[in-house]
Amino acid sequence: MRITPRSHEIRKIVDILEDPTFDGPEQLAKAVIKEVGDMLQMRDLFVMVHTWADGGKGLNFGPFGAVAEAETFAKKMSFGGTGRVVPLTSSGVMLANHDGKKDGWPGYCWNPECGHAPWTHAIEGASRGKCHLETCPCTKFVKDDPSIKAKKKTTVKKGTAKAINEL
């Protein structure tokens, strides 16, 4: 299965690898494997469903990380029948929509008591407000990680910029 690592996934693995609290390489390896498993559970995957030429059920293959990967495989391996690509909805996304993704996942609420998807929050003007789920005490959708401060934009005062040949 081919996947493209996302920046937040890389950051989580780097944090584990740089954590000095692990007692040994076995404990570190277990933590990395568990984290990668959680990451893969948050991705929608694809399978190839094969049907024989006579209409009988064929062989099914997967998972694949992208539609293009599954289609390429289907072209090579749908001998004696046809292969169709079928998307699999991520079980991790379904659970995160219900339980909340409380370990900080992009696109989900960063409120430590919430972690639900944006569409579970009420719309308040141009932003999102209270979580609709009855079991959730969240009063406002937190879009970005509060531990990362937004970079301030620095503006250049008019008339103070220098041309390249003046530097």
Image (cartoon, grey):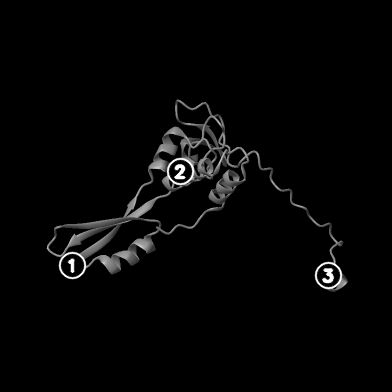
The residue indicated by pointer 1 is 80
Type of amino acid at the residue the image marks with label 3:
Ala
Seen in the picture, residue 137 relative to 50 is either above or below; the reply is: above
Do callouts 2 and 3 mark residues in contact (Cβ within 8 Å)?
no
Secondary structure, mark 1, is: loop
- Distance from label 2 to label 1 (Cα)? 37 Å
Total number of numbered discs in the rendering: 3
Q: Quadrant of residue 57?
A: bottom left
> Which callout, 1 or 3, points to the residue nearer the camera?
1
Q: Position of residue 161 (x, y in %)?
A: 84, 63
Give SS at disc 2.
Answer: helix
Residue type highlighted by circle 1? Gly
- Which residue bears the numbered disc 2? 38
Spatial CA span between label 2 and label 3? 50 Å
Query: Outermost residue toward the bottom?
Result: 165
Give the class, few, some or many, for how many residues have Cα within 10 Å of label 1's Cα (few <14, many ≥20): few
Q: Residue at x 74, y 48 (%)?
A: 152
| Mark 3, residue position | 163
Of helix, strand and loop, which one carries label 3?
loop
Q: Earlier in the sequence, mark 2 or mark 1?
A: 2
Query: Which residue corresponds to the image point at 45% horizontal and 30% vertical from the top-left?
Result: 133
Residue in view at x 77 percent, y 53 percent: 154
17, 89: nearer the viewer: 17
